Image: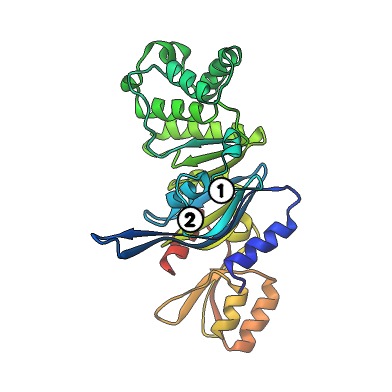
Amino acid sequence: MKSVKDTADAQLANRDTPPVVITSELRKVYRTGFWMNQQVVSLKSCSLTVYQGETFGLLGPNGAGKTTLLKLLLGIIRPTAGKGLLFGQPLGDHRIKQRIGYLSENPYLYEYLTGWEFLQLAAGLFQIPASVQRQRIPELLDLVGLSQADARKKQMRRYSKGMLQRVGMAQALINDPELIFLDEPMSGLDPIGRYRMREIILSLKAAGKTIFFNSHILSEVEQICDRIAILSQGELVCIGSLGELLGTDETYHVKGEGGDWAILKKWLPNIVFEPDASWHGILQGDYYDFLSSLRLMGGKIMAIHLSRQSLEEFFIQQISQQ
């Protein structure tokens, strides 16, 4: 079975859009303890590529290394080993900051400013002229569904969680970035808030923006993303499009027992072996050829049906195997 790196390299070779984000064997180790003589590996040799105009979802349980990877890409922290490029420039290069937008999971906003004043402050940091601000700020407030009256008159300490997320998103877009990093953009939002955030991301996607985001809300990721990657314990365990990882509408979910495990893994790359010697997985290949191969291996089918896994099922399967 191909490694995650081999799969990423093959996808790179088959794309006709330029890469925007590239990491190669990126690694981050933190030193802890009183004497700083203990090491915690937060990210292990991560290699991935994100292409222009795609929406890329990074998934993983708490502590998997998602935020660490995001901070490395943004130049907030430096890697222990490996390298990365954004728009062809090394990570942390100040020349690319103008082309990037970022919304953190728990953004710190100046609570005694109004939303409008906060966006003016963010625009000033990018040296956006006042004439452009007067047009851009109302457009962004309309995009994120925040009324101009609230933005002008209400201090952000009086905002709800959803309103804070929306003004945070407007801030991330104030410079009209080409690449947008979102760290858990739907965290803490109610269903209406998640719907609005999803619609914002889809509108950015339709505008040709490149979006890289982390999320625990897998149903939203499944609706939005072109490709995903899963991190577990700092290690990249899989990467690909939803069709490649979950299968298509003509995908067979197979359960059986017996056979040669090494050969079965070639047919069912995401196979799960149970303690009772049975197994199940998603068939990758021709149904009839698989049955012939299984018969020669001495295995047998217990159940088979057309099925596309949900992202939640696939995610739990991948994490449980680590």
At 62% from the left and 74% from the top, the residue drawn is 267
Question: In the image, residue 193 lies at what x, y percent?
Answer: 43, 31
At 54% from the left and 22% from the top, the residue drawn is 140
Horizontal arrangement in the rendering, residue 293 relative to residue 109 (left or right): right
At 37% from the left and 27% from the top, the residue drawn is 109
Which residue does the numbered mark 1 point to in the structure image? 91
The amino acid beneath tag 2 is Pro
User: Nearer the N terminus, badge 1 or badge 2?
Assistant: 2
Question: In the image, residue 21 lies at what x, y percent?
Answer: 61, 49
Horizontal arrangement in the rendering, residue 64 relative to residue 51 (left or right): left
Quadrant in which residue 201 is drawn: top right
Residue 292 is labelled as: none
Nearest the viewer among 146 and 182 is 182
At 43% from the left and 20% from the top, the residue drawn is 118
Nearest the viewer among 130 and 115 is 130
Query: Most extreme residue toward the front, as rendered?
Result: 35
Kindly report the distance in space between the C-alpha atoms of the residues bearing marks 1 and 2. Answer: 9 Å
Quadrant in which residue 151 is drawn: top left
Question: In the image, residue 100 lies at what x, y percent?
Answer: 57, 36
Question: In the image, is residue 117 above or below residue 205?
Answer: above
Nearest the viewer among 20 and 206 is 20
Question: In the image, residue 39 lies at what x, y percent?
Answer: 34, 64
Look at the numbered disc 2 and give the secondary structure of its residue.
loop
Question: In the image, is residue 259 above or below residue 46?
Answer: below
Q: Are marks 1 and 2 in contact (CB under 8 Å)?
A: yes
The amino acid beneath tag 1 is Leu
Quadrant in which residue 293 is drawn: bottom right
Residue 79 is labelled as: 2
Residue 179 visible somewhere in the drawing: no
Look at the numbered disc 1 and give the secondary structure of its residue.
loop
Question: In the image, is residue 222 above or below residue 297?
Answer: above
Task: Categorize mark 1 by other alpha carbons within 10 Å: few (<14), some (14-19), many (20+).
Answer: many
